Image (tube, rainbow, N blue to C red):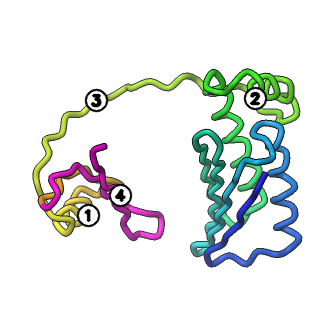
Amino acid sequence: MKVTISTKDYALSDKFRELILKKLMRLDKLFGRETEAKVIMKQIHDTTSLELTVYFNGMMRAEVKSINDMESNIDSAIKKLVRQIDKHKNKFDAKVRGEFLKDREYYAMGQPEKDSKVVKRKTYHLKPMSLDEAMVQIDLLDQDFFVFLDEKTGAVDVLYRRDDDDFGLIETEED
């Protein structure tokens, strides 16, 4: 597995870098050696955050946060990825699925997650507005995200609040 590790406001020691690489090499059995993985570690005040993204015939991602315990973050992120594989195992080819089932005890995952379902529906009428208006609305509504119709492009966009209290914008476009 090809691993890229980057940090933001987090001091990464060589020893811990080696530990991360060693733990991620366990995933070789599931994804193969040519798979790419990206690890992003962040420190915001006393909270540490770790994002683990694995790129193969698609992408799987896990994000974990804790109070100053990056080592447990990597373990939790790997467990989340394995749970995702377990949940979507029919999407993997027979070889990968067979190796996963064979090595399942190795990861000691415990009970699989229950099947998710839609438990609530909302209807939302989109109003054309600017990005600045959407930022005001997300604050007024005290929400983590806000869906709006961009008045300039006519596209449906999603504005979301990031953990660092800045905003992110997901812009849609038609194929």
Task: Count residues near mark 1 (Cα–Cα under 10 Å), then give few for <14, some for 14-19, many for 20+.
Answer: few
With 145 as the anchor, is 36 left or right in this view? right
- Between the residue at mark 2 and the residue at mark 1, the CA separation in whole angstroms equals 45 Å
- Between the residue at mark 1 and the residue at mark 4, the CA separation in whole angstroms equals 11 Å
* Amino acid type, label 3: Arg
The image quarter containing residue 21 is bottom right
User: Does 131 appear above or below 144?
Assistant: below
- Between the residue at mark 4 and the residue at mark 3, the CA separation in whole angstroms equals 19 Å
The image quarter containing residue 71 is bottom right
User: Foreground mark, 4 or 3?
Assistant: 4
N-terminal label among 1 and 3:
3
Question: What percent of the width, then of the height, locates residue 126?
Answer: 14, 46
What range of the chain is rendered magenta?
Answer: 152-175
Mark 1, residue position: 139
Mark number displayed over residue 121: 3
User: Foreground mark, 2 or 1?
Assistant: 2
Secondary-structure class at tag 1? helix
- Between the residue at mark 4 and the residue at mark 2, the CA separation in whole angstroms equals 35 Å
Mark 4, residue position: 160
Mark 2, residue position: 96
User: Foreground mark, 1 or 4?
Assistant: 4
With 119 as the anchor, is 18 left or right in this view? right
N-terminal label among 1 and 4:
1
